[in-house]
Image: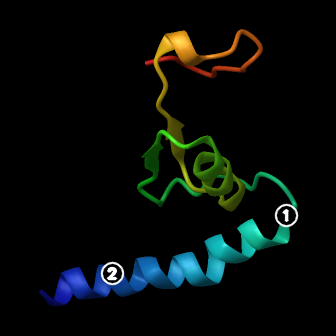
Amino acid sequence: DAQYLFLEIHSFMDWVLIAQPRISSGIGANTVNSAWMGAFMHDSDICNKLHMAGVPVWYVRTMAYIPANMKVMKPV
């Protein structure tokens, strides 16, 4: 239980002190923090915000909904 609580507090502090200020700044994409677990997203707005914060993010879409002009780094 103590380890779980420590990790929850640590992740909350990362979110409040690092991720949220990056999103609020509106500067654009930051370097991805590879120490963070990341997230799979269906919502493009949330995906963009997490990317701006430097969170590893994967945008999950079916091929039928991917526009021809969208840059896909590596389909999986």
SS of the residue under disc 2: helix
Q: Quadrant of residue 16?
A: bottom right
Looking at this rendering, what residue extends furthest in the left direction? 1
Looking at this rendering, what residue extends furthest in the right direction? 27
Mark 2 Cα within 10 Å, few/some/many (few <14, many 20+)? few
Quadrant of the frame with the N terminus: bottom left
Residue 12 position, x and y percent, is 45, 81
Q: What residue does disc 1 label?
A: 26
* Residue appearing at x 68%, y 15% in the figure: 67
* Residue appearing at x 38%, y 87% in the figure: 9
Residue 2 position, x and y percent, is 17, 90
* Residue appearing at x 56%, y 17% in the figure: 65
> Does residue 45 sit above or below 16 in this rendering?
above
From the viewer's side, name the closer residue of 74 and 68: 68
Quadrant of the frame with the C terminus: top left
Instruction: Report the Cα–Cα distance between label 2 and label 1.
Output: 26 Å
Q: How is the image coloured?
A: rainbow
Q: What residue does disc 2 label?
A: 8
Mark earlier in primary sequence (2, 1):
2
From the viewer's side, name the closer residue of 24 and 37: 24
Mark 1 Cα within 10 Å, few/some/many (few <14, many 20+)? few
From the viewer's side, name the closer residue of 57 and 60: 60
